Structure formats: structure tokens, C-alpha cells
């Protein structure tokens, strides 16, 4: 896919065959990266005049959807962690209500130009939805915001041994390994659900495809048995935090943007910034916020911020740090920082880490190797102004190679959808006369 400056696009293709997109997701609220991208997709599709139906696992009470003219069909469900244990164990395995809801939409609204775009499903909707989608498989696309389509724990991460997992999902080696964050029985529950996913999402069926968000993620889908022709790589969209370039060489503050959770490596960063004597600003919210506010008063806590409000908070930053302990399928904040001319310091678990190394956009480190994060932060702290400015300018020049622009991302999706519709139209048997 060729990347373009959105300002130079003189027309916004809607697809020759596409007449409606049915978007399917656990949530209708922007409560995470996947939901934020889903809402961006809805806005882009509606801007191009494409009718959209959203099937959501929650209550669907996002007022922005009505303003966009999106038809909302809501299951009114809750995330697994917010349900009683027995209900979570059963309904989290197979949500029959969600299956019926999807089946009803297909029965009442399906047409040859309709595409079904599945985002996240693991918290409310469950593998049951793919059973309902099987009759329209050639027009179904599944977005890999995480790796739950391929891996039982959704991350290809062996949490017990603190390393990236390279096992084949549901193989004997996989089933005999306790890799789960909680317990081995929970791993077995996840494995049982994954077996059910394989039944509902028969990989021999002619599905439209799986959308991987980085080439590195595509390797995991292949290991799980998805054929090459089913996998389409469409990098996530990213916008810069600020117009122009952050003058990183003049700044001292380290910034982090994301959830304040253990798996994100936030506490590692808090401790390392303190030990290397660098100011730290955390932009985001999560279950660690109270502990950080109580025990680390030197850290600036900004809470969750809209994309528009992040810009002023990074203008005095020296680098953005992403210290994730688990494999990040993409790492959107890396692309957003780079497009702003802000160097990045990233753990080697992220999909974009090799891009950062190859393009000279920052520093990488092993989050599971004690002292590595300190080393990287000292290096960025002591880097000369000349060297850091050159890195900042490389970021600005290379940012569009890391991620799509928002309009190009929508165009890439629509192109995928339309090609699938064209293939189905070509392969369909001719209508019988009379």
C-alpha cells in the first residue's frame, strides 16, 4: 500500500461493490486501542457515505454513534472480569445470545454488497459469533488488534517464564505449559475456548481474511494454521501528537502514554526513571495509578487524555518510553511519537521494535533483563544535542513508514472489502432464468 499525505487525497473511494459494513466489537465506548480504531473506522466509512451497522457486546450507549448515523444493535453484556465467576466461565466460553443476534442481523440485512468486519470478541461476544458468520464467510474480515484468533492467551506470551512464546497453539507443548498470568486451570479454560474457536471459525472455510496490524504479527497467525492467502497486513493509523517537530534535544522529561498496568512495564519505568534521575510524566490511567500517586510523588500523573490534549504534554519531552512486558502487536504510541519527531525507548517485545532499530528512531532494551532499561534511559539522557536532534529528525522523516495515515488506513480497508466482494461476484454461479 502506498502512503499518502491525507491532504493530497482529492477523492475518497467508497468501493465499487461495497454497500454496507457491519462492524462487530465487544465495546462501543473508546475504552481501549481497538475500540478507538473501531470508532475511527465508523467515522471514515460514514464520511464516504457508506451505511454502517454496529453489533456491540455492551449496551451501545455511545451518543457519538447516533450523531454519525450508525445503526447500533447491542447485546447489553459485560466484560468477563465484571461478571460472577460461574457466569464468566460459561458465558465467556460461548455466548449463545451473541450468536443469535449476529444471525438475526444476517437474516434481516444481508445483501451481496455487505461486508462483516470483526474487531474484538474475547470479552463479551465469544467464538459463538463466528458460527453465525459462517454462511457469509467470504465477506468476513477479522482484525488482529490482539492475537486471540491465534493464541489462547491472546499475546503469544509465556508469563510464567517471562518470554515470548513460539509454541504452536493447542499443540502438546502448548497444552502442557502453564503460561497463564493467573493459573494453570485458567490456561486450560482458555485452551478449551480456543478449541471451540477452531470449531466455530473453521479455517478451511473461505473467510475474507485476517487483518494483521504488522508483518511480525502475521507470523503468529501462520503458526496457528491460517493460510497465507487469508492474511492481509494493514498497519494501524497514526497521527502526530503535534504539528512540526518536538525539539527533543532541548528537553529532559520522559513520557509514557498508555494504561497504567503491570504488563505495560509501568512500574519498571517508574523505578528506572527515579534511579537515573530523570523526570517522568505518565499519560493514562489504570489500576496502578493509586500506588504510584502514593509511593512515587516525583512522578507527574496526567490521567487519561484525549488525542487532542496529549500534544501539549509531550512538547517538552526528550523521549517516549514504551516498556511493555508482553508482545505488543503494534505499539501505536511509537508511531504517534515518531511522527512528532519524538525519539522512542522501547522494549524488545513490541512489533515495531525492529523498525525502530532499523530506522534509527530510538533505543531498544530487554525489559526482562535487570538493568537494561536503566542503561537505555542513561543513554538517552546523556546523548549529545546534535545526536538527539538527528534522531528526532529521522523520526519525523520516517514516521509515515511505521503507520498509515488515518485516511489511507480507511482506504486500505475499503480496498480489501471491495476486492472480496468482487471475487465473490465473479465466482457466484449465474442466476437461473425463470
Image (spheres, rainbow, N blue to C red):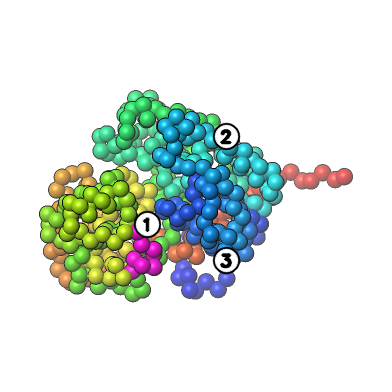
Q: Is residue 337 above or below residue 247?
A: above
Question: How busy is the neighbourhood of tag 2: few (under 14 within 10 Å), some, or many (20 plus)?
Answer: some
Q: List the residue tagged with mark 2.
A: 96
Considering the image in quadrants, where does the C terminus appear? top right
Query: In the image, residue 138 lies at what x, y percent?
Result: 61, 44
Q: Is residue 136 above or below residue 196?
A: below
Q: Nearer the viewer, mark 2 or mark 1?
A: 2
Q: Is residue 133 left or right of residue 305?
A: right
Q: Is residue 377 something one can see in this rendering?
A: no
Q: CA distance from mark 1 to mark 3?
A: 23 Å
Q: CA distance from mark 2 to mark 3?
A: 34 Å
Q: Which residues are magenta?
A: 304-311
Considering the whole magenta stretch, tell me its main secondary structure. Answer: helix
- The secondary element bearing badge 3 is classed as helix
Give the residue drawn at x 50%, y 65%: 407
Question: How busy is the neighbourhood of tag 3: few (under 14 within 10 Å), some, or many (20 plus)?
Answer: few
Q: Is residue 270 left or right of residue 425?
A: left
Query: In the image, residue 105 lies at what x, y percent?
Result: 65, 45
The reply to whether the magenta stretch includes residue 374 is: no
Disc number placed over residue 332 in the picture, else none: 1
Q: List the residue tagged with mark 3.
A: 47
Query: In the image, residue 348 lies at what x, y percent?
Result: 27, 49
N-terminal of the two: label 2 or label 3?
3
Q: Nearer the viewer, mark 2 or mark 3?
A: 2
Residue at the right extreme, as displayed? 434
N-terminal of the two: label 2 or label 1?
2
Amino acid at each position: 500500500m502506498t502512503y499518502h499525505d491525507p491532504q493530497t487525497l482529492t477523492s475518497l473511494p467508497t468501493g465499487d461493490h461495497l454497500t454496507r459494513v457491519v462492524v462487530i466489537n465487544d465495546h462501543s465506548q473508546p475504552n481501549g486501542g481497538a475500540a478507538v480504531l473501531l470508532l475511527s473506522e465508523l467515522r471514515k466509512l460514514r464520511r464516504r457515505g457508506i451505511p454502517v451497522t454496529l453489533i456491540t457486546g455492551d449496551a451501545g450507549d455511545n451518543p457519538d454513534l447516533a450523531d454519525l448515523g450508525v445503526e447500533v444493535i447491542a447485546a447489553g453484556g459485560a466484560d468477563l472480569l465484571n461478571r460472577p465467576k460461574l457466569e464468566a466461565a460459561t458465558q465467556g466460553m460461548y455466548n449463545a445470545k451473541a450468536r443469535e443476534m449476529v444471525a438475526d442481523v444476517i437474516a434481516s440485512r444481508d445483501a451481496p454488497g455487505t461486508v462483516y468486519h470483526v474487531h474484538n470478541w474475547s470479552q463479551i461476544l465469544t467464538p459463538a459469533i463466528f458460527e453465525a458468520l459462517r454462511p457469509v464467510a467470504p465477506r468476513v474480515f477479522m482484525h488482529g488488534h490482539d492475537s486471540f484468533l491465534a493464541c489462547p492467551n491472546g499475546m503469544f506470551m509465556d508469563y510464567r517464564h517471562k518470554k515470548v512464546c513460539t509454541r504452536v497453539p493447542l499443540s502438546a507443548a502448548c497444552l502442557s505449559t502453564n503460561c497463564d498470568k493467573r493459573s494453570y486451570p485458567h490456561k486450560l479454560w482458555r485452551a478449551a475456548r480456543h478449541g471451540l474457536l477452531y470449531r466455530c471459525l473453521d479455517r478451511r472455510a473461505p473467510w475474507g481474511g485476517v487483518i494483521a496490524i504488522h508483518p511480525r504479527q502475521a507470523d503468529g497467525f501462520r503458526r496457528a494454521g491460517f493460510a497465507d492467502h487469508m492474511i492481509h497486513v494493514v498497519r494501524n493509523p497514526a497521527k502526530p501528537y503535534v504539528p512540526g517537530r518536538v525539539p527533543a534535544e532541548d528537553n529532559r522529561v520522559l513520557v509514557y502514554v498508555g494504561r497504567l498496568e503491570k504488563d505495560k512495564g509501568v512500574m519498571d519505568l517508574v523505578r528506572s526513571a527515579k534511579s537515573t534521575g530523570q523526570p517522568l510524566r505518565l499519560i493514562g490511567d489504570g489500576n496502578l495509578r493509586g500506588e504510584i500517586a502514593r509511593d512515587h510523588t516525583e512522578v507527574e500523573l496526567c490521567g487519561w487524555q484525549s488525542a487532542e490534549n496529549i500534544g501539549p504534554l509531550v512538547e517538552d519531552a526528550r523521549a517516549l518510553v514504551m516498556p511493555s512486558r508482553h508482545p505488543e502487536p503494534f505499539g501505536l504510541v511509537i508511531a504517534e511519537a515518531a511522527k512528532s519527531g519524538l525519539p522512542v525507548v522501547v522494549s524488545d517485545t513490541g512489533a515495531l521494535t525492529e523498525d525502530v532499530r532499523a530506522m534509527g528512531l530510538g533505543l531498544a532494551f530487554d525489559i526482562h533483563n535487570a538493568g537494561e532499561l536503566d542503561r537505555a534511559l542513561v543513554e538517552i539522557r546523556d546523548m549529545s544535542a546534535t545526536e538527539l536532534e538527528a534522531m528526532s529528525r529521522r523520526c519525523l522523516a520516517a514516521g509515515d513508514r511505521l503507520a498509515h495515515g488515518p485516511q489511507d488506513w480507511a482506504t486500505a480497508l475499503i480496498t480489501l472489502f471491495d476486492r472480496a466482494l468482487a471475487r465473490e461476484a465473479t465466482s457466484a454461479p449465474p442466476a437461473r432464468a425463470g
